[in-house]
Image (cartoon, helix red, strand yellow):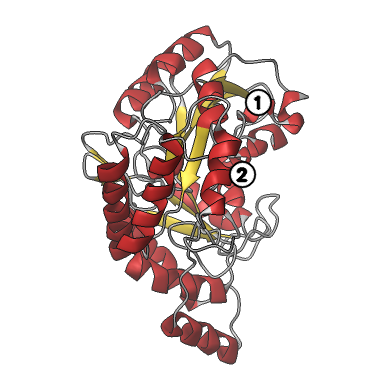
């Protein structure tokens, strides 16, 4: 059956196209005013002193770890439930990821599990904490543990643009925040792109150099860097989308509330939790289905025109490229969650009819119409 409720909806309007056209006609395609404007506006939105545009979210994480001097012999604590890109830069730099289980309600790093892991570590260096699905992690507790063990804190906020903890935006809470603008994210740049946020001027200057072949403002190559620049066309689209992001977040939260109203009592799924003091921005709306029923659930919804996703089907340490390089880690909560999670359609343009179509299908599954 053809899709009637798409999983996501990528926004691109005339104003964005016009700004791209203006950049193309200007002849200034890299290292220009569009990137500088976007960086300044993104820093203001995140309430940080600096924002540095880079080529993608993975580059943001890699450069963040490089400027924090993470390397061989260092252990970096990372949630077992996250995207591969949170972990691959750790391995690329020769450091060791230590996988930490997740909180069963937030689906983000469990502070109790981190506390135990940090106490047992021989060379703790940093935490890479993911604000998963748009849900902020328990940052107050995680930061307290980081202070106790002298750990640097990297926020992987790729899925959580403008989410907040006690009114403070993610990306402003740790030492460095890392964002992705991949086309399916809550905001994008018309392609790939990323951003690094920080209040530390020295770290920001180092990242600016590393993204441009290690070249500082004097023109000298002071570090061994590569090319991780954000193009002017991407920055122009990103700046337009950033202006719309607050209203898009409102749309996502309204859609999530409508899902909650219909599905909180549905026996077929467990809906995502809302956490006091935190603003969830719903990059995904993940539900948990009964063990062993995920494929049947997804097929049932697909037959009714509802597209779904899985984020993600296994813990990161279970991925072959990671499994071959790290010691086995037991993270049972994350493993169980990965086996049961399904993401329902989520974007700010979901209509009441779309929500009803999705919920009707979920309820029909629960009632055994299969």
| Residue, disc 2 | 62
Q: Position of residue 295 (x, y in %)?
A: 60, 37
- Discs 1/2, front: 1
Residue at the outermost right position: 324
Near-viewer residue (224 or 291): 291
The residue furthest front is 369
Q: Residue 285: x and y, percent?
A: 41, 45
Q: Residue furthest top?
A: 120
As helix, strand or loop, the secondary structure at mark 2 comes to helix
Distance CA(mark 1)–CA(mark 2): 18 Å
Q: Is residue 320 above or below residue 67?
A: above
Residue nearest the viewer, comparing 333 with 277: 333
Asked if residue 160 shows in the view, the reply is: no
Which residue is at a point 62% across and 15% down the rendered structure image?
A: 329
Left or right: 274 in relation to 61:
left
Q: Which mark is residue 69?
A: none
Which residue is nearer to you in this view: 199 or 326? 326
Q: Residue at x 58, y 65 (%)?
A: 230
Q: Secondary structure at mark 1?
A: helix
| Figure check: 217 above or below 86 | below
> Does 182 sit left or right of 356 as displayed?
right
Query: Residue at (68%, 26%) from the top-left corner?
Result: 318
| Left or right, residue 79 beside residue 285 | right
Residue, disc 1? 317
Quadrant of residue 275 within the rendered picture? top left
Res. 301 visible in picture: yes
Residue 228 position within the rendered picture, expressed as x and y whole percent measured from the top left: 64, 58
Going from the N terminus, do you reach mark 1 or mark 2 first? 2
């Amino acid at each position: 059956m053809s899709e009637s409720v798409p999983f996501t909806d990528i926004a691109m309007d005339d104003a964005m196209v016009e700004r791209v056209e203006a950049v193309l006609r200007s002849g200034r395609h890299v290292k220009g005013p569009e990137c500088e404007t976007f960086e300044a506006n993104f820093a203001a939105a995140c309430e940080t002193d600096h924002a540095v545009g880079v080529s993608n979210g993975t580059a943001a994480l890699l450069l963040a770890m490089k400027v924090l001097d993470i390397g061989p012999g260092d252990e970096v604590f990372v949630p077992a439930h996250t995207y591969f890109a949170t972990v691959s830069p750790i391995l690329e730099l020769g450091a060791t990821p230590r996988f930490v289980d997740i909180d069963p309600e937030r689906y983000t790093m469990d502070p109790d599990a981190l506390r135990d892991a940090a106490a047992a570590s021989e060379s703790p260096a940093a935490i890479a904490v993911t604000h998963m699905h748009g849900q902020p992690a328990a940052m107050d507790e995680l930061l307290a543990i980081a202070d106790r063990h002298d750990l640097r804190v990297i926020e992987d906020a790729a899925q959580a643009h403008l989410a907040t903890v006690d009114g403070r935006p993610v990306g402003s809470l740790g030492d460095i925040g890392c964002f992705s603008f991949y086309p399916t994210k809550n905001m994008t740049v018309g392609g790939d792109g990323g951003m690094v946020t920080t209040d530390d001027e020295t770290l920001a200057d180092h990242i600016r150099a590393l993204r441009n072949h290690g070249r500082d403002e004097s023109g000298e190559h002071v570090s061994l860097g590569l090319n991780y620049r954000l193009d002017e066309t991407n920055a122009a689209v990103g700046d337009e989308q950033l202006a719309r992001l607050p209203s898009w977040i409102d749309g996502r939260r309204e859609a999530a509330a409508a899902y909650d109203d219909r599905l909180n009592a549905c026996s077929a799924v467990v809906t995502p939790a809302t956490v006091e003091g935190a603003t969830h921005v719903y990059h995904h709306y993940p539900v948990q289905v009964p063990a062993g029923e995920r494929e049947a659930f997804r097929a049932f919804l697909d037959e009714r025109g509802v597209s779904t996703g899985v984020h993600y089907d296994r813990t990161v340490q279970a991925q072959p490229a990671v499994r071959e390089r790290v010691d086995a880690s037991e993270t049972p909560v994350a493993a169980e969650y990965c086996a049961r999670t399904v993401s329902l359609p989520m974007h700010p343009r979901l209509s009441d009819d779309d929500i009803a179509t999705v919920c009707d299908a979920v309820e029909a599954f629960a009632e055994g119409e299969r």
